[in-house]
Amino acid sequence: MPKHGKRYRALLEKVDLNKVYSIDEAAALIPQIKSARFDETVEVHVKLGIDARKSDQNVRSTVALPHGTGRTVRVLAIAKGEKIAEAQAAGADIAAGEEIIQEILDGRSDFDAVVATPDVMGAVGSKLGRVLGPKGLLPNPKAGTVGFNIGEIVREIKAGRIEFRNDKTGVVHAPIGKASFAPEKIADNLRAFIKAVESAKPESAKGTYLRSVYLSTTMGPSIKVNPSSAHQS
């Protein structure tokens, strides 16, 4: 077991490891467990009662966080005709046609999210699958990043919509804000996230679906959260 430093141990003393906190209580602890000189990301980790080996039990969806993530997302939109202008008007940092595919193949990577209209996905998927796929950036209808409503998609992502999916161990990890956020905003975002994960429950998943929920900062200890408090006012 790795040994934690003095600063981490001091932060750990502020968290009761035997307690399951409500969302509001956990959010209120965030200002007390941040210690880095940078604005730490607030992360949520959800252990799901699924068999990640079975494709029909995998969880993948999106959620629009009420207060965003606190991170500026550079959006690349690939489309045709007037849809390029629509994406640009909606705030896309880069809006282009299929000609940008070659630029990406040549190494261009000044974007954090990629969206596309269905009529360019043939070229995007076949040519960029190996480049964008491993990075989790390939547009996908299930992730809400493919559609002719390209302007709406761009606006939602710029406003703080995020995608989430389980890893091979059945855990979902996601950023839901910054340590500088007011606790009320962190709580709002966490409620929205938990509800979205609940809504994405596969029909074939049996037993307890939300096994555990933990909230943490980039450099701080984890806080165990009661997921049922997402439905308490």
Image (cartoon, helix red, strand yellow):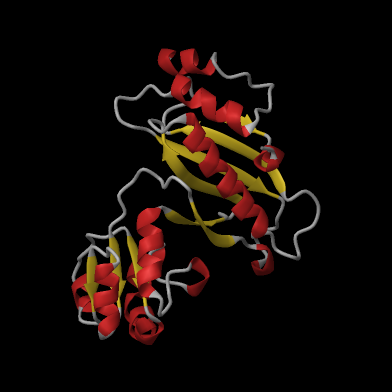
74 vs 191, nearest the viewer: 191
Name the side, left or right, on which 6 lies relative to 26: left
Q: Residue at x 48, y 26 (%)?
A: 30
Residue 136, given in percent of the width and then of the height, sits at 41, 62
Left or right position of 131 against 68? left
Residue 83 lies, with reference to residue 77, above or below; the image says below
Residue 221 in view: no
Give percent across and percent down for residue 88: 24, 70
Quarter of the image with the C terminus is top right
Residue 206 visible in the picture: yes
Task: Name, please, the residue furthest toward the front.
Answer: 233
State which quadrant residue 205 falls in: bottom right
Residue 121 found in image quarter: bottom left
Residue beneath the point at 49% across and 74% down: 141
Residue 95, x across and y down, in percent: 24, 72
* Residue at the image position 21 percent from the left and 76 percent from the top: 100
Q: Quadrant of residue 35?
A: top left
Check the picture and name the quadrant holding the N terminus: top right
Query: Relative to residue 52, is residue 125 drawn left or right?
Result: left
Vertical placement of residue 67 versus 96, above or below: above
Residue 98 against residue 110 in the figure, above or below: below
